[in-house]
Image (cartoon, grey):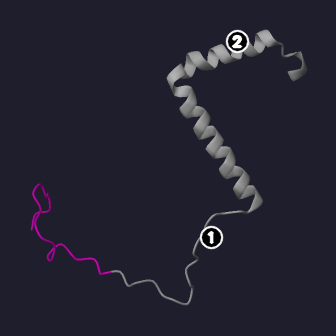
Amino acid sequence: MLQNLSGMHLAVIVFMVVLLFGAPKLPVLAKSLGRSLRILKQEAAGETAAPERIADPAVPFAAQPAARDAAERPAVAGDTDLR
């Protein structure tokens, strides 16, 4: 399929891209595409800049405060809870 692609076809494709995205946005689009490809290559090679820190399973999570019931909760403007 790609072997039948001529110069005229490429010109039409480039024209459509410029028409869709606009000339001022093309450098930004190319930069973000290049950055995405660079990140993809780094991740595929396993070269992450900073390894993520894994939480120690032996350390428990901080205790969550107990939920207050309606009697302890302060009244808020627009509150429909009739006490």
> Where is residue 61, by image quadrant?
bottom left
| Residue 42 appears in the picture as rendered | yes
State the SS at label 2: helix
Residue kind at label 2, given as amino acid type: Val
Q: Which residue is mark 2?
A: 12
Specify few, some or many for label 2: CA neighbours under 10 Å numbering under 14, 14-19, or 20 or more.
few
Q: Position of residue 30 (x, y in %)?
A: 61, 33
Asked if residue 20 lies left or right of residue 63, the reply is right
Say left or right for 80 vs 31.
left
Viewer-side residue, 20 vs 82? 20
Q: Is residue 21 left or right of residue 7?
A: left
Q: Secondary structure at mark 1?
A: loop
Residue 28 within the magenta-colored segment of the rendering: no
Q: Position of residue 83 (x, y in %)?
A: 9, 68
Mark 2 vs mark 1, CA separation in Å: 44 Å
Q: Is residue 75 magenta?
A: yes
Q: Residue at x 23, y 77 (%)?
A: 68
Which residue in the rendered view is the most extreme toward the top? Answer: 8
Q: Quadrant of the N terminus?
A: top right
Residue range corresponding to the magenta coloring: 65-83
Residue at 70% of width from left, 12% of height from top?
A: 12
- For the residues bearing labels 2 and 1, Cβ distance under 8 angstroms: no
Q: Which residue carries the number 1 mark?
A: 51
